[in-house]
Image (cartoon, grey):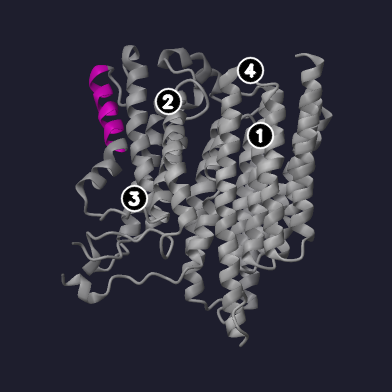
Amino acid sequence: MSGALDLFSIAAISVGGFFFLAGTVGLLRFPDPLCRLHALTKVDNLGLGFIVLGLIARSDGVFGALKLVAIWALVQLAGATSAQLIARAIRRKEQIGAKSAGGSPAA
Amino acid sequence: MNALGAVDLGLALLVLAIAGWTIAAREAFAAIVGYVAYGLLLSIVWARLFAVDVAMTEAAIGGGVTGVLLISAAARLRQAQTAEDERPTLPLRLMAAALSALAAIALGAVILSLPEPGPSLAPLAAKNLAATGVGNPITAVLIAFRSFDTLLEKVVLLLAIIGVWSLAPDRYWGGAPIAPRAARPVGALTFLAQLVAPIGVVVGVHMVWVGADEPGGAFQGGAILAAMWMIVMMARLSEAPPVGAPWLRAALVAGPAVFLIAGASGAVTSGAFFALPQAFAKPLILIIEAFMTLSIAVTLPMLVAGPPRRAPL
Amino acid sequence: MTEFLLAAAGLILFTVAVGLARVLRGPGDADRLMAAQLLGTGGVAALLIVAAATGARGLEDVALGLALLAAFASVAFVNSGAPPERDDAPEAASK
């Protein structure tokens, strides 16, 4: 393993780790559910993405690298779908809440 | 080694904390999310203990089947919301606490009284691994060395199905259950199911296939396949089959039946019940695994789908 | 390098574990679910890193399984928020 590749791995994994940190801080500190959801999706694509990028540099062979990319793609798909679904659920709940409070449904 | 030690310690504390929270949580849904997180952490713990096969099972069952089962159950319970007025009385809670503490103390005492080093058949199993022809010791133990236990574990799943189905009212007997699913088709969910299900089927079969020589096996692969059938039903792309369907019944019993036939033929050919003739050990194990996978993949979604709730056509 | 990778895996795991505070605090069920989702992604990342660091076999398959099922809890949650489905009406039974 050459030094340059190691350095690349370290850099990419560190960046990925930073996004995990940022996503967690966002999940904990952002004021409302939709903002928190936004923070979460960054972790799925950028956080895991950079880590997979860093690991690809160390993977043995094309198939190992492809497997990593496949796992990332699956997490992306799952993350994007559940973000959609959760956002819908949050909106539905808000609308029900607005109606029962007597106000007009939130736009 | 230091980094790893710190990770292990942290993991152990985290698992305990989540377990405590899951028990203490008042609201069903909060407890369930805690439990799902607990399962995720457990699967990482198993991976750290080098029990990768168990980690896979935990990931597949905890991430797929149990989560859906519990969340759907919580939703049903919420419709019949009585939690507030059915709060257990103080003496009842004290008694429950005392009983739980007693069980915990008994378990702890048993574990502390185990001899050191514990009795183990592992060296014996490892020595005879070559005779089975499979490279994964877990698979060899499950299908060859303790086949009777494995068979009974699958029979337990069948009993569970019979138990669930027996909750059906008479007029629905033979009809189809309504699996937990979206109230109406949702674009994002349909897209997910259409994309993930074929990939998951490949992954499930892969896990069974590599299970002969690498971590994996019938239960892990079967649980993944089961999850794929569930996502297809949850997205309303397909319906749960009527419980009277002959193909369903056949698929449910296929695994235990084939296992039993192989075991019985062992009594004839090799002189002992469940003795697999050495020359055919590996192909036999693979055939048994394949049918087991089928049965598991069908049993788990039907357990989640529940009793029949539609009249037979 | 191995040491760095293990430390990174541990840090990621603990970062997302801190996020589990959302499971405790809520306030909504969706918030709790997001914390579990984050833990799932963190678990996949940690497993992949440990697999690369130690070369342990099969860990990637565990991560693959987790990735495959990552959306399940969310799907079940959203479905469970839908109005309950009625069992077949008696008149349908006579058909």
Horizontal arrangement in the rendering, residue B51 relative to residue B185 (left or right): right
Q: Give coordinates of residue B116: x percent, y percent.
A: 68, 29
Local crowd size for mark 4, using a 10 Å CA cut-off: few (<14), some (14–19), many (≥20): few
Residue interval drawn in magenta: B256-269
Q: Main secondary structure of the magenta part?
A: helix
Circles 1 and 3 on the same subunit: no
Q: Of circles 1 and 4, which is in front? A: 4
Horizontal arrangement in the rendering, residue B181 relative to residue A80 (left or right): left
Residue position for label 4? A60
Name the residue rendered at 68%, 37% in the picture: A49
- Badge 1: chain ID: C
Residue position for label 2? B209
Q: In whole angstroms, how far apart are the C-alphas of marks 1 and 3? A: 36 Å
Horizontal arrangement in the rendering, residue B7 relative to residue B263 (left or right): right
User: From this viewpoint, is residue B145 visible?
Assistant: yes
Horizontal arrangement in the rendering, residue B64 relative to residue B233 (left or right): right
Up-down relation of residue A88 to residue B12 (above or below): below
Q: Quadrant of residue C31?
A: bottom right
